[in-house]
Amino acid sequence: MNACRPTEGTTEEMATRHREDTLLAPGRSKLAPPPMFKVVLLNDDYTPMDFVVHILQHFFGKTQEQATQIMLRVHNEGRGVCGLYPADIAATKVAQVTGYARQHQHPLQCVMEEN
Ligand code: TYC
């Protein structure tokens, strides 16, 4: 079993270091932290402001005040960060937001980018 992400070393070293009976020093992780991705909303001229605020509350756990601030940043600056997540969670958020916006016939764009 090799479900880990080595930061250094050859395959032979890994086979030695990853024996099931090898104890790690307490509190020292052998895993590098996962790459993280920003989920970003992009501005457009058609999606209603209320709808964007709702998206930020429902899919990103923002309060009404936080959601309004982020929506206004997107509206005024062209883009805004909704959150920072591991790749699979970020991709799921992008798909959920995009699907929900299309169901409601809004052109809202949501993308992910490596931090
Ligand atoms: N610009 C839109 C409007 O004036 C509002 C908007 C905000 C759209 C954020 C998209 O990601 C967005 N209705």
Image: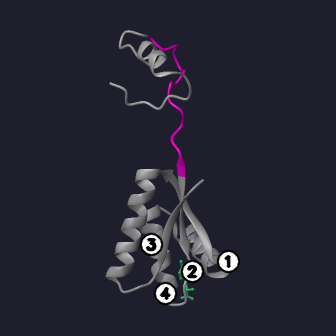
* Classed neighbour count for the residue bearing mark 4: other residues with Cα under 10 Å, few (<14), some (14–19), many (≥20): few
In the image, residue 113 sits, relative to residue 77, either above or below, namely: above
- The disc, 1 or 3, on the residue closer to the chain's N-terminal end is 3
Span highlighted in magenta in the image: 23-36
Q: Residue at x 67, y 81 (%)?
A: 76
* Classed neighbour count for the residue bearing mark 1: other residues with Cα under 10 Å, few (<14), some (14–19), many (≥20): few
Label 1: which residue?
77
- Which quadrant of the figure contains the N terminus? top left
Which amino acid does the dot numbered 3 rest on? Ile
Query: Ligand 1 closer than 8 Å to the CB at disc 4?
Result: yes
In the image, residue 104 sits, relative to residue 21, either above or below, namely: below
Q: Position of residue 53 (x, y in %)?
A: 50, 76
Which amino acid does the dot numbered 2 rest on? Asn
Q: CA distance from mark 4 to mark 1?
A: 16 Å
Label 3: which residue?
55
Label 2: which residue?
43
Residue contact at pointers 1 and 2, CB within 8 angstroms: yes
Q: CA distance from mark 1 to mark 2?
A: 8 Å
Q: Position of residue 71 (x, y in %)?
A: 57, 76
Confirm whether residue 69 shows in the render: no
Q: CA distance from mark 3 to mark 2?
A: 14 Å
- The secondary element bearing badge 3 is classed as helix
Query: Ligand 1 closer than 8 Å to the CB at disc 2?
Result: yes
